[in-house]
Image (spheres, rainbow, N blue to C red):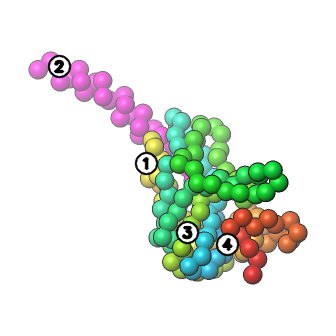
Amino acid sequence: MRILPFVILLAWPVAVSADQAEVQVNNVWSRAATAGHQGVVYLTITDTGPPDKLIGVTTPVAAKAELHQSFDDNGVMKMRPVASLPIEPGKPATLAPGGYHIMLTDLKQTLKPGDSFSVTLKFATAGQITATATVAKPGASMHGTEAMPQHMTMPMHESDKQP
């Protein structure tokens, strides 16, 4: 039975490393959107532990939440779903208009400015982290900002279009 203490000692550093994973989610916000339509969530992820990756998203306000990437294809803005987003220590990953974002499909409720809702992010190493998204005005370029002038916006989703 001398093998058991040896196995426990080998497993101990792995457990300590997993507990030391430090992923923080900040600046979580969404634009106002109408029930039944699409919405979007933006945020910043900071990792101070081992490398990780965002592998899934859920929220009670939408039938489906997916990680998407917006990109310019010869002057035409397009978007596509992505399976995961690598998160590197010391390099915050910012999900923002015109880049990576969380796409909310078939909203179950209207998202009004000032409202908030939960978003659960699933990471390969850190597990699940639940954050609260605050709803900004339609067309906002950052949380807490006014809508951008119409000539500066380029709608990519129904939720991005001005009423």
Q: Is residue 115 rendered to the left or right of residue 150?
A: left
Could you tell me residue 59's position as x and y percent? Answer: 49, 66
Q: Secondary structure at mark 4?
A: helix
Q: How many marks?
A: 4
Amino acid type at image mark 1: Gly
Crowd band around label 4 with a 10 angstrom C-alpha radius: few (<14), some (14–19), many (20+): many
Please rate how many residues cluster around mark 3, counting C-alpha atoms within 10 Å: few if below 14, some from 14 to 19, many from 20.
Answer: some
Residue where numbered disc 3 is placed: 105
Residue at the disc numbered 4:
159
Q: Nearer the viewer, mark 1 or mark 2?
A: 1
Identify the secondary structure beneath mark 3.
Answer: strand
Q: Residue at x 62, y 66 (%)?
A: 40
- Answer with mark 3 or mark 2, whichever residue precedes in sequence: 2
User: The magenta stretch spans which residues?
Assistant: 1-27
- Mark with earlier residue (3, 4): 3
**Considering only vertical position in the picture, is 39 above or below 72?**
below
Classify 10 Å Cα crowding around label 1: few (below 14), some (14-19), many (20 and above). some
Residue 94, percent from left and from top: 67, 50
Q: Report the residue marked by disc 1.
A: 127
Q: CA distance from mark 3 to mark 1?
A: 23 Å
Sequence-wise, the earlier of marks 1 and 4 is 1
**Residue at mark 2:** 3
